[in-house]
Image: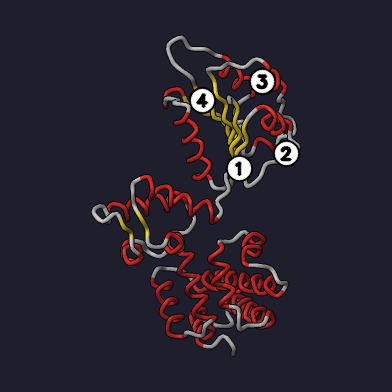
C-alpha cells in the first residue's frame, strides 16, 4: 500500500499511528518530507513523489490536509494521474486532525478506493488497550487500568509519560498498584472539577469548600469555577434525561461522546435527583455568574454560599 489517509481530532494519537506506519515501512528520518497543502501546490508534492534517488531507500511524503480541504479550488487531477503510474519508492501519507472527513471530496474518494483510510478515535476501549499493550510489552501488570485512566485523563502523551514514571517506580515488582498511582500522579484538573461537582451533588460541604479553596490557592477565578461546575451539572442533566429515556450507560456514553466511567459515576450521582432539580441548580449557577459580573455580589462569597447550600 502506497497511499494512506489518517484522521482524528487527537493530534498526538494521529501522529503516534503515523510514526508506527513509518517504522513498519522502515522509513529513515532523513527520507521523510512534510508538506502542508495550504502552503504548497499539489504539483510540487507529486513532483517530489516522482523523484527517484539513486543513493537512498524509500521515502515518505506527509501531507497535512486539515484545513486545505475547505478550499473548493483545489485541483486533484495531478494526483489522480499519479495514482495510475506511481513511484514505488514513495509513500504518500495524508493527515487530517479532524474528527471526520467529508467523503464527498474527490481526494477522499480516491484514497478510499486506491489507498488505506485509518480513523483514529480515542474511545475508552482504545485507551484501555493502549495502556494494556504498553504494560504487556514490558511485562508489567496494573491493579486497575481504569483507575489509572481516571487519574491521567485521555491525552495520549500524558498517559505515556505517566506510564513511564510508574514503570520506573515498579521496576523490581513489575506490579503497579493503585497506591502507586495515587502517590506518583497528581490528579488532573478535569478530575478535580469532577470531584468538586460530586461533593456539591452529595452535599459534602466540607469537601466542597476544601476543593474550592484549593482551586483558589492555585489561582483559578471563581467565575471560571462556576463555568466548570455549570458544565458538570449540565452533564448530569443530560445523563439523567437519557436514563429516563431508558438508554443504557453504553448508549449514553456514545451519544454524549463521553468516557464510560464518567457516565457511570454521573448516573449514580444523579440517581436521587429529578431533571427539574438539576436544571434549577444550573439556573442558580447562571444567575450567580451574572450577578458577580454585574457587581451585585462578591465573587468569593457568592460561590461559597452556593457550595454551602445549593438549595437556598
Q: Position of residue 97 (x, y in %)?
A: 58, 42
Q: Which residue is mark 1?
A: 119
- Circle number at residue 14: none
In the rendered image, the quadrant that contains the C terminus is bottom right
Question: Residue 95's image quarter?
Answer: top right
Element at badge 2?
loop
Across the whole image, how many numbered discs are drawn on residues? 4
Question: Quarter of the image holding residue 249?
Answer: bottom right
Residue that protrudes farthest toward the top in the picture: 54
Between discs 2 and 4, the one toward the N terminus: 4
Q: Secondary structure at mark 3?
A: helix
Query: Upstream in the sequence, badge 1 or badge 3?
Result: 3
Which x, y percent locates residue 184? 32, 61
The residue that disc 4 covers is 60
The 10 Å Cα crowd at callout 3, few under 14, some 14 to 19, many 20 or more, is some
Q: Position of residue 281 (x, y in %)?
A: 62, 80
Q: Residues within 10 Å of mark 2 (few under 14, many from 20)?
A: few
Tell me where residue 149 sits by quadrant. Answer: bottom left
Q: Are marks 3 and 2 in contact (CB under 8 Å)?
A: no
- Residue 96 image point, x, y percent: 60, 39
- The residue identified by callout 3 is 83
Q: Label 2 to label 4, Cα distance in Å?
A: 24 Å
Q: CA distance from mark 3 to mark 2?
A: 18 Å
Q: Which residue is mark 2?
A: 103
Mark 1 touches mark 4? (CB < 8 Å): no
Amino acid at each position: 500500500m502506497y497511499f494512506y489517509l489518517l484522521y482524528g481530532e487527537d493530534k498526538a494519537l494521529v501522529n503516534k499511528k503515523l510514526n508506527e506506519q513509518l517504522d513498519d515501512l522502515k522509513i529513515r528520518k532523513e527520507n521523510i518530507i512534510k508538506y502542508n497543502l495550504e502552503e504548497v501546490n499539489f504539483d510540487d508534492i507529486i513532483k517530489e513523489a516522482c523523484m527517484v534517488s539513486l543513493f537512498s531507500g524509500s521515502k515518505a511524503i506527509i501531507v497535512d490536509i486539515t484545513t486545505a480541504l475547505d478550499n473548493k479550488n483545489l485541483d486533484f487531477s495531478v494526483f489522480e494521474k499519479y495514482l495510475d503510474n506511481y513511484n514505488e519508492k514513495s509513500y504518500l501519507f495524508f493527515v487530517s486532525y479532524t474528527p471526520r472527513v467529508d467523503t464527498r471530496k474527490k481526494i477522499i474518494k480516491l484514497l478510499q478506493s486506491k489507498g488505506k483510510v485509518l480513523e483514529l478515535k480515542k474511545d475508552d476501549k482504545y485507551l484501555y488497550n493502549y495502556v494494556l499493550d504498553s504494560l504487556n510489552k514490558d511485562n508489567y501488570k496494573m491493579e486497575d487500568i481504569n483507575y489509572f485512566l481516571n487519574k491521567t485523563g485521555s491525552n495520549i502523551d500524558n498517559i505515556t509519560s505517566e506510564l513511564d514514571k510508574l514503570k520506573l517506580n515498579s521496576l523490581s515488582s513489575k506490579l503497579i498498584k493503585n497506591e502507586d498511582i495515587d502517590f506518583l500522579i497528581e490528579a488532573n484538573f478535569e478530575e478535580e472539577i469532577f470531584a468538586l461537582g460530586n461533593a456539591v451533588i452529595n452535599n459534602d460541604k466540607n469537601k466542597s469548600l476544601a476543593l474550592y479553596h484549593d482551586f483558589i490557592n492555585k489561582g483559578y477565578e471563581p467565575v471560571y469555577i462556576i463555568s466548570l461546575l455549570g458544565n458538570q451539572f449540565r452533564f448530569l442533566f443530560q445523563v439523567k434525561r437519557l436514563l429516563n429515556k431508558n438508554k443504557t450507560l453504553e448508549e449514553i456514553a456514545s451519544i454524549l461522546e463521553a468516557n464510560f466511567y464518567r457516565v457511570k459515576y454521573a448516573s449514580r450521582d444523579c440517581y436521587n435527583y429529578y431533571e427539574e432539580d438539576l436544571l434549577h441548580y444550573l439556573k442558580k449557577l447562571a444567575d450567580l455568574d451574572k450577578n458577580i459580573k454585574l457587581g451585585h455580589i462578591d465573587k468569593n462569597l457568592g460561590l461559597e454560599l452556593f457550595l454551602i447550600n445549593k438549595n437556598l
